[in-house]
Image (cartoon, rainbow, N blue to C red):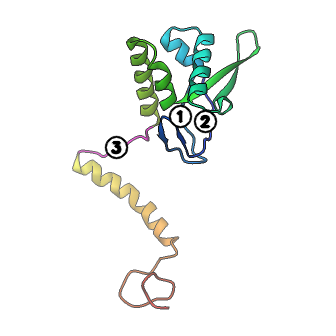
């Protein structure tokens, strides 16, 4: 089960600061995935999550989710951000903790933007630049700052004339 991308507010947990931009999606892990990775029953993971949220004085409704089981029935689940996932499983054994940490690393790696590929061969690099040149010219021609290069003052140019 994949968790929907929840929107959480900037806030502070009693366990330390949590900095989350309002409106920004936050990566989460579902209680079902936690159960699968730790080898625990989903109902036990949900119980542990409720206990943890209660002790941290956090509103459980902010982490609630629903999934449809194999029979087509709606079931409760939770979607936890990284800090709460690690807080939860830190009470479990070392093998379980390692599985969770490894999975979070995979989630974070998958969320990273792909780095641009820069050719190592100078001729290939020149070809890539030549292919980009017409696009750059087109963007410059459509720019409101077009014609602002040079030394004479022109209206509408930053740092130039009125």
Query: Badge 3: few (under 14), some or many (20 or more) residues near its Cα, within 10 Å?
Result: few
Disc 2 versus disc 3: distance between alpha carbons?
A: 29 Å
Q: Is residue 131 above or below residue 41?
A: below
Q: Residue 5 has which mark?
A: 2
Q: Image quarter for residue 105?
A: top left
Query: Badge 1: few (under 14), some or many (20 or more) residues near its Cα, within 10 Å?
Result: some
Does residue 60 appear left or right of residue 153 in this picture?
A: right
In the rendered structure, which segment of residues is drawn in magenta?
112-120
Q: Which quarter of the figure is the N terminus placed in?
A: top right
Does residue 152 appear left or right of residue 7 in this picture?
A: left
Q: Image quarter for residue 75?
A: top right
Give the mark nearest the N terminus, 2 or 1: 2
The residue closer to the viewer here, 118 or 153, is 153
Q: Position of residue 161 (x, y in %)?
A: 46, 91
Q: Is residue 53 magenta?
A: no
Q: Nearer the viewer, mark 1 or mark 3?
A: 1
Q: Image quarter for residue 8?
A: top right
Would you name the residue on which mark 1 appears?
27
Q: Nearer the viewer, mark 2 or mark 3?
A: 2
Q: Position of residue 95 (x, y in %)?
A: 39, 12
Would you name the residue on which mark 3 appears?
117
Pointer 2 and pointer 1: residues touching (CB < 8 Å)? Answer: yes
- Could you tell me what secondary structure mostly forms the magenta stretch? loop
The residue shown at (28%, 45%) is: 119
The residue closer to the viewer here, 132 or 109, is 109
């Amino acid at each position: 089960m994949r968790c929907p991308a929840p929107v959480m507010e900037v806030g502070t947990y009693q366990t330390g600061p949590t900095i989350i931009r309002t409106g920004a999606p936050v990566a989460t892990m579902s209680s079902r995935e936690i159960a699968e990775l730790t080898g625990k029953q989903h109902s036990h993971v949900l119980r542990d999550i409720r206990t943890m949220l209660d002790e941290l004085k956090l509103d459980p409704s902010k982490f609630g989710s629903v999934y449809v089981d194999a029979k087509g029935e709606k079931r409760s689940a939770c979607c936890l951000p990284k800090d709460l996932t690690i807080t939860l499983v830190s009470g479990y054994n070392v093998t379980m903790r390692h599985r969770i940490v490894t999975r979070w690393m995979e989630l974070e790696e998958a969320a990273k933007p792909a780095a641009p590929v820069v050719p190592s061969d100078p001729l290939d690099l020149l070809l890539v630049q030549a292919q980009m040149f017409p696009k750059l010219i087109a963007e410059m021609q459509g720019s409101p700052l077009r014609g602002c290069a040079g030394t004479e003052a022109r209206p509408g140019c930053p740092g130039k004339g009125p």
